[in-house]
Amino acid sequence: MTNVLFICGKARKRSPTAADVLARWQGFSTDFAGLSRDADEVVSPEHIDWADIIFVMERKHKARLRTKFGSLAAGLKLISLDIPDKFDTHEPALVDILIQKLTAHFGPIT
């Protein structure tokens, strides 16, 4: 089982949607968190330690994650999906983009 963490700003729209989308694939355990102090689920060292792969929604999240967690995040596979904060939770357009981008990384849903 591969543990995949999705991170965005407030963990309200993009990252929970991404976690739900990837949970459809076999062989993945998913979770989500946010980098903002007022995130619904604030990213913690435990999240980072649990993850095998971390997807961030925007490149700026990658930089913030590295600044906040330093060496803890240094050895992780950290990938930006480059998805802007303009979608609602489970919005069909967001789901379509996530399926396309995750399929490019992991192959089709199995």
Image (cartoon, grey):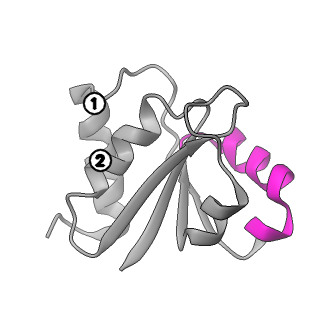
Q: Tell me which residue sits at (81%, 58%) in the image.
A: 69
In this figure, which residue is indicated by the disc labeled 1? 90
| Badge 1: residue crowd in 10 Å (few <14, some 14–19, many ≥20) | some
**CA–CA distance in space, label 2 to label 1:** 9 Å
Quadrant housing the C terminus: bottom left
Q: Main secondary structure of the magenta part?
A: helix
Expressed as whole percent of the image width and height from the top left, the position of residue 41 reads 57, 39
Tell whether 5 sits left or right of 93: right
Instruction: Specify the label residue 20 is tagged with.
Output: 2
From this viewpoint, which residue is outermost toward the bottom?
1
Rendered view: 28 above or below 14: below
* Residue 14 at x, y percent in the picture: 43, 34
Labels 2 & 1 near each other (Cβ < 8 A): yes
Residue range in magenta is 57-73
Query: Which of the marked residues, 2 or 1, is nearer the chain's N terminus?
Result: 2
Judged from this view, the residue extending furthest toward the left is 110
Marking on residue 37: none
For label 1, the SS is: loop
What's under tag 2, amino acid-wise?
Asp
Residue 8 location (% of width, % of height)? 57, 38
Q: Residue at x 33, y 62 (%)?
A: 104
